[in-house]
Image (tube, rainbow, N blue to C red):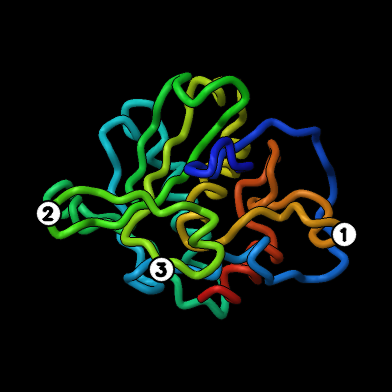
Amino acid sequence: MKKRTILLATSIAMSMLTGSSNSYADYGIAHVKKGSNTNGPDFQYWLDSSVASYGYTDIVKNAETNWNAVSGSTAKLWEISDAYASLAQIKIYVVYGSLGSGVYGAADYYNRLSNGALSTVYISDINNGSNYNFARIQLDAGSMSQWSWAERSMNTGHEIGHALGISHFEIAPAHSGSHWMKSGKFNLSSPTSEDANHLANKW
């Protein structure tokens, strides 16, 4: 959620907020990344075996279903098998306690080089228009061990939202209240209309 370093968009514990009202929409780079995945609005995602091991498969599927249902957006997510993992636009892993205290999830970005190596694409560059081949998402099951299903769904949807090209809802007074793309811990199993509007603006 908030950036832990320039390499990561991470989920940081913040004070709880309530309500879902907003004063106006803000589609600047603070909320919608200018750069995009090089595959456009079509996002194949691959699940590492850790996702099933920690019981997050249905939570990822919930994020897929809800983001795919956004009216007016051409962005689509679908899962691919291990045989096609190298083609994924999003790779999802679940870790346990390795992201650091108070960090619930992280998204970082890469380009694939012709020699097979990976080159990091920094969030600041993506915000200013650089594109990327794929995003790696890490969800920390240890940090979320006491969370409800809806809270874990919110955080998972949040990190996938980053991979889709949406940033944080942190610039006041826009987007007050609880949203998937706002930093924090919210009991939301589906995105709000403001989350949806931002995805439709991006794609």
The disc at residue 173 is 1
Mark 3, secondary structure of its residue: strand
- Residue type at mark 2 is Asn
Query: Going from the N terminus, do you reach mark 1 or mark 3 first?
Result: 3
Residue 158 picture location, percent across and down: 57, 49
- Residue type at mark 3 is Lys
Compared with 51, 69 (above or below) is below
At 63% from the left and 69% from the top, the residue drawn is: 198
Compared with 47, 110 (above or below) is below
At 47% from the left and 19% from the top, the residue drawn is: 97
At 32% from the left and 33% from the top, the residue drawn is: 52
Tag 2 and tag 3, C-beta contact below 8 Å: no
Query: Going from the N terminus, do you reach mark 1 or mark 2 first?
Result: 2
* Disc 2 residue crowd, few under 14, some 14–19, many 20+, Cα 10 Å: few
Compared with 95, 75 (above or below) is below
Tag 1 and tag 2, C-beta contact below 8 Å: no
Mark 1, secondary structure of its residue: loop
Q: Nearer the viewer, mark 1 or mark 3?
A: 1
Q: Nearer the viewer, mark 2 or mark 3?
A: 2
| The furthest residue to the bottom | 72
The residue carrying mark 2 is 115
Query: Going from the N terminus, do you reach mark 2 or mark 3 first?
Result: 3
The disc at residue 76 is 3
